[in-house]
């Protein structure tokens, strides 16, 4: 299939089944490691880009058991009822080990997956977190080109996957259970600092605990923003203070409040130019991340480096040469 | 001066004034950016290495106002009274901006700096954190070769400087004030997780607040170690649980307890082989960090990359090409 045909099938809106198949094939192409596929994928992405950028990119994070699937299903159905089209992507670094994915089983969001206006794609299940994140970023562009209004990128709290998702979305939401200690864990990992919105799910089970958790996390967020480095803040604290809302995804209670908060944030960030600035920053950071990865890969594969590395590593480990000297020797081996 | 002469003057113990001058000159050589100086410095380091490794490397971190200088002075005098020689180095990334250093003013540790058994060197005041950290790591080797028994590396809580100090020391201590919220800040920044020992200073001002802070931080550390990823743990929780002790550096109260805890940790880590393993890991991590830095620098200086970069950055920022495509184009420009 030519690149023009691929792109045409994705951006058209009249034949949903054709579009859906073209999206699946395009994403499979993006996930391929064959160099000729990669060249085609690059050409396709460049052709798709003018059709992207109109969706709202929503990141959702939360540890297993917090009710992410139930929440995303409730939210997706709520949005589809409003006439919107919703795509769900995932980043699950653990799937690269287990071969399984948090979204591999579509029955996890049974009702949502049956909707014609929903597109659900499991996490790529091979490669490093950087590689998985790259494929998800590119898949997000495919969904946008296909006219989806909201693209949800979900992740479990594994490694740096939250940072990866925050780095590709317009708004980053953290789901929490109403348990003491869970917020400490999220603060420790730096996840709270990334959050534009914190959602306390399962509030129906113990409304009092949920309210207590809401108060506690609100106060923690205030302390964090007081002590935080303003250069690292991703929104102006005077304009948007990260909120904490309680809801019950299982009972679909509070999903409308959630979406109202998201819509308010989106309007604010669009009006003050911070959404465009955030996307620009994300795209450039993504470029440099891929450059770093490529540089390291080329270094490790260089014959001169491969020949010298075992000896250098042994000498550094045993204290026979200084690490900085070994680094200079290895860099010289690549250059020479 | 030849490398042999330099090394000889540093490792000898009979002429303290000659040694002190040689150390200062050696560290100045390490801090030089001239390529010929760098080659000499590498040669000198390799010759010094067999004389290093016998000191205990102690990292001390704490925000401005926590009383670091007073604490290090009290500790240094305590150790000198026991017949030990103490060197104090510093990493202050803020000094690269201000030109000043947390240790630039020796009057900050007036009594300690007058001792013949003490050597105090301010933070290198130019370059990136990576560069500053490299020079401090190398200076640490010079101090060890000169026979100092304890090398203290201190840092303020700026950027990633705590991680850098933890990555070059045998034990990492965090100084805290007995204030609520301060521990939250340290947890957020991931500093608490790095700590082998937490010191609550200024306990004399409000002993009750200090005891409360001790209990609170102890419980936070327990929660963090429960939720932490065991692969990232830098000591076996069964053998060493990070402790929290209270003291008053100003009144020199509790400094002996502090040193007793440090000595216990040192013996434990030496006996179970974790100290040697930690140093080996640190040296290899340092080598890879310098390689990464060198790769990025070579990339940015490559004529083909410099020619293409402005256009690629503009195209990525405006959404004309995908970030991953731009990264591949730039990598090809360096390779081609």
Image: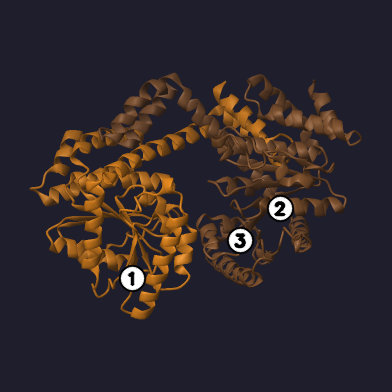
Chain colours: A orange, B brown
Circles 1 and 3: CB atoms closer than 8 Å: no
Identify the residue under disc 1. Answer: A201
Subunit of label 2: B
Question: What residue do we see at 30% from left, 34% from top?
Answer: B316
Q: Residue at x 50, y 58 (%)?
A: B188
Kindly identify which residue carries mark 3: B177
Left or right: residue B308 compared with residue B148: left
C-alpha separation, residue under disc 1 versus residue under disc 2: 48 Å
Between B38 and A224, the one nearer to me in the picture: A224
Q: Where is residue B101 in the image (x, y as percent from the top left)?
A: 63, 39
Q: In the displayed structure, does residue B168 sit left or right of residue A55?
A: right
Element on which disc 1 rests:
loop
Percent position (x, y) of residue B205?
66, 66
Horizontal and vertical percent position of residue B247: 71, 63
Displayed quadrant of residue A241: bottom left
Q: Is mark 2 on a helix, strand or loop?
A: helix
The label on residue B70 is 2
Q: Can residue A94 be seen in this view?
A: no
């Amino acid at each position: 299939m030519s690149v023009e045909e691929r792109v045409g099938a994705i951006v058209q809106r009249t034949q949903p089944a054709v579009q859906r198949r073209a999206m699946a094939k395009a994403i499979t192409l993006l996930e391929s490691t064959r160099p000729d596929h990669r060249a085609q994928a690059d050409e396709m992405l460049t052709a798709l880009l003018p059709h992207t950028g109109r969706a709202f990119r929503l990141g959702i994070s939360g540890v297993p058991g917090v009710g992410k699937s139930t929440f995303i299903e409730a939210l997706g159905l709520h949005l589809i009822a409003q006439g919107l089209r919703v795509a769900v992507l995932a980043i699950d670094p653990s799937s690269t080990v287990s071969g399984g994915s948090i979204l591999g089983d579509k029955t996890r969001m049974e009702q949502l997956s049956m909707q014609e206006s929903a597109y659900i794609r499991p996490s790529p299940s091979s490669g490093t977190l950087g590689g998985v994140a790259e494929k998800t970023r590119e898949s997000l562009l495919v969904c946008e080109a296909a006219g989806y209004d909201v693209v949800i990128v979900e992740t479990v709290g594994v490694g740096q996957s939250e940072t990866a998702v925050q780095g590709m979305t317009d708004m980053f939401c953290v789901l929490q259970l109403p348990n003491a200690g869970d917020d400490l864990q999220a603060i420790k990992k730096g996840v709270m600092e990334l959050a534009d919105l914190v959602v306390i799910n399962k509030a129906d089970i113990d409304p009092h605990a949920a309210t207590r958790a809401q108060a506690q996390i609100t106060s923690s967020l205030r302390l964090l923003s007081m002590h935080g480095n303003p250069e690292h803040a991703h929104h102006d604290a005077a304009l948007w203070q990260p909120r904490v809302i309680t809801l019950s995804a299982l009972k679909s209670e509070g999903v409308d409040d959630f979406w109202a908060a998201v819509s308010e944030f989106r309007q604010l960030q669009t009006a003050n130019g911070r959404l465009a600035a955030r996307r620009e920053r994300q795209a450039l950071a993504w470029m440099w991340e891929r450059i770093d990865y490529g540089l390291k890969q080329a270094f490790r594969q260089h014959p001169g480096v491969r020949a010298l590395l075992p000896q250098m590593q042994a000498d550094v480990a045993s204290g026979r040469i200084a690490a900085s000297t070994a680094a200079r020797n290895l860099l010289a081996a690549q250059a020479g």
